[in-house]
Amino acid sequence: MDAIKFRAPEKSDGAAVWELIAHSGSLDQNSLYCNLLQCSHFAPTCVLAERNDNVVGWLSGYVPPQQPDTYFVWQICVDAETRGQGLAQRLLRQALARDACQGVRRVECTITRDNTASWALFVGLARDLGAVIQSELHFDRQKDFRDRHASEHLVSIGPFCPDRVDRLHAA
């Protein structure tokens, strides 16, 4: 199997990211414009995974201005042929090791109750970071989504020590 390369996205990657998400079959698809912004404005906190110049993984995330110690994971997507190889975990480790995440001591995301793969991923991250994981209802199906989407639970991992991230990235 050819090696996977990780890098910050560039504006020109926006369409490939949009197509990867569209073919996932399970993720909410944002507009192409949104993915172009993620690949340009948010590039320092997003990670692209490539194999043979093909995009096989994507992680979008950012540090909220009101929470400079928190990295919010917006979306993780792995190509169907690459699933089951730990790529989502590697994408998270790459993101947390970035210069843009140096002050981060907490990871947050939202997950629907039925997304067992994401729950397993973030429970594993909490374990690896030696941090507490908590969740609470964040966006309600009826109130916020008007019955168009399942409720999303805010998952919070942390606080954790920066040396734990360094050890994770080295592993």
Image (cartoon, rainbow, N blue to C red):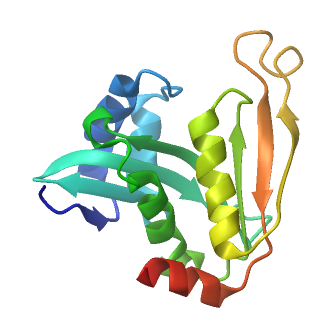
- In the image, 166 versus 124, the foreground residue is 124
Horizontally, residue 30 falls left or right of residue 74, namely left
Residue 63 visible here: no
Seen in the image, is 125 located left or right of residue 85?
Answer: right
Query: In the displayed structure, would residue 33 be above or below residue 62?
Result: above
Looking at the picture, does residue 129 appear above or below residue 2?
below
Q: Indicate the position of residue 102 as horizontal and vertical percent values.
A: 59, 83
Tell me, yes or no, if residue 51 can be seen here: yes
| Residue at image point 35% right, 51% down | 85
Q: How many marks?
A: 0
Q: Quadrant of residue 125?
A: bottom right
Residue 23 relative to residue 145: left or right: left
Task: Give coordinates of residue 128: x percent, y percent.
Answer: 63, 71
Above or below, 98 against 92 in this view is below
**Which image quarter holds the N terminus?**
bottom left
Residue at the image point whose x is 58% and y is 51% from the top: 121
Measuring 31% from the left and 38% from the top, which residue is drawn there? 79
The picture places residue 60, in percent across and down from the top left corner, at 50, 51
Identify the image quadrant of residue 170: bottom left
- State the image coordinates of residue 37 (x, y, percent, origin top left): 44, 47
Residue lying furthest bottom in this view? Answer: 163
Q: Which quadrant holds the C terminus?
A: bottom left
Q: In terms of depth relative to the viewer, which is nearer, 73 or 4?
A: 4
Find the residue positioned furthest to the top: 147
